[in-house]
Image (cartoon, helix red, strand yellow):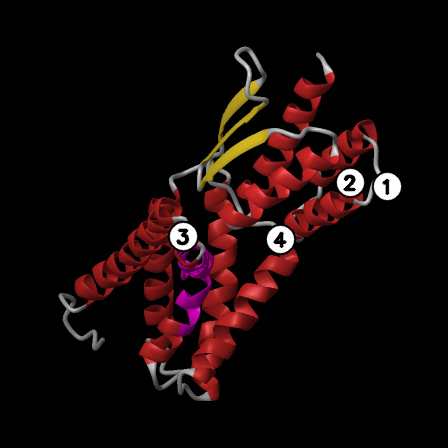
Amino acid sequence: MNDQQRVLEFVMAAGEVLLKNGAEVSRTQQTMEIMAKSLGVDSFHGYVLTNGLFASMGTDYGQPAQIRSVPASEVHLGRVEAVNALSRKIAQGHVTLDEAYEELERIKKMPYAPSRDQILACGAGSACFALMFGGIWQDGLIALAVGLGLQVFLLWMGRWGLNKLFTKFLGAAFVALATMLLFLTGFGQNMDKSIIGALMPLVPGMALTLGIRDLIMADFLSGTIRLLDALLTAACIACGVGLVLGLATMIPGVNV
């Protein structure tokens, strides 16, 4: 493998890490271009979509080129920050290509937050949102309990590798069902506030934010894809809650 091919391989791998872990399209493309230029490649041509990377080096026939499919994955902004820091070191000339490869491999292996922390964060966030939307403290406690259970449910579902939209649908149904069961005990006053609070961890805020950012940066195709992803996710959440509440209204004695 010659130097140009090694640089292209590294730049594509770095772009894949960025895109897979939540970086916006424009940032990914800009970082790839900076890395390539800093590593001695004068003619680098890259094109980034929400789920794909396209790049070539040089203008002559037979120059190295690559295409990579980047499937959707869980967001890990720590990896994005680490790649950005590595890019700055490369631009300053503090890192060789071999050292950059080693650092990138370390970044790829950065773990996600422990399951315990994810569960606690989901529960606390759900409770805070329930209170913020006007619920009383009892509603917040119910949202806390449901949020804790939701993250446990999502972690369990993640082991099966199910489609993201189906997972969101089941997660929303779990929230509605668990909240209703807890309210049947007579504890709590505003079921809607508890449900909304516990649903917030499922809301596609990242996809919506990045979609708007991509549109602002004139990446219309990527922005449209991300916004469509956000809309489909929101629709699945609504369907999951609506199905459970709709079935509950058919049960005599249950007041939703």
Q: Name which residue lies at 34% across and 83% down.
A: 190
Q: Secondary structure at mark 2?
A: helix
**46 left or right, relative to 237:** right
Residue 73: x and y, percent? 51, 42
Depth-wise, is mark 2 or mark 4 nearer the camera?
2
Q: Name which residue lies at 22% across and 63% down.
A: 242
> Where does the magenta region start and end?
197-213
Residue 32: x and y, percent? 62, 38
Q: Earlier in the sequence, mark 3 or mark 2?
A: 2
Q: CA distance from mark 3 to mark 4?
A: 23 Å
Residue tagged 4: 77
The quarter of the picture where residue 117 lies is bottom right
Q: Earlier in the sequence, mark 3 or mark 4?
A: 4
Q: Residues within 10 Å of mark 2 (few under 14, many from 20)?
A: many
Does the magenta stretch mainly form a helix, a strand or a loop?
helix
Residue tagged 3: 218
**255 left or right, relative to 123:** left
Image height check: is 83 above or below 233? Answer: above
Res 90 label = 2
Q: Secondary structure at mark 4?
A: helix
Type of amino acid at the residue the image marks with label 4: Leu
Q: Nearer the viewer, residue 228 or 92?
A: 92
Q: Earlier in the sequence, mark 3 or mark 1?
A: 1
Q: Residues within 10 Å of mark 4 (few under 14, many from 20)?
A: some
The quarter of the picture where residue 246 lies is bottom left
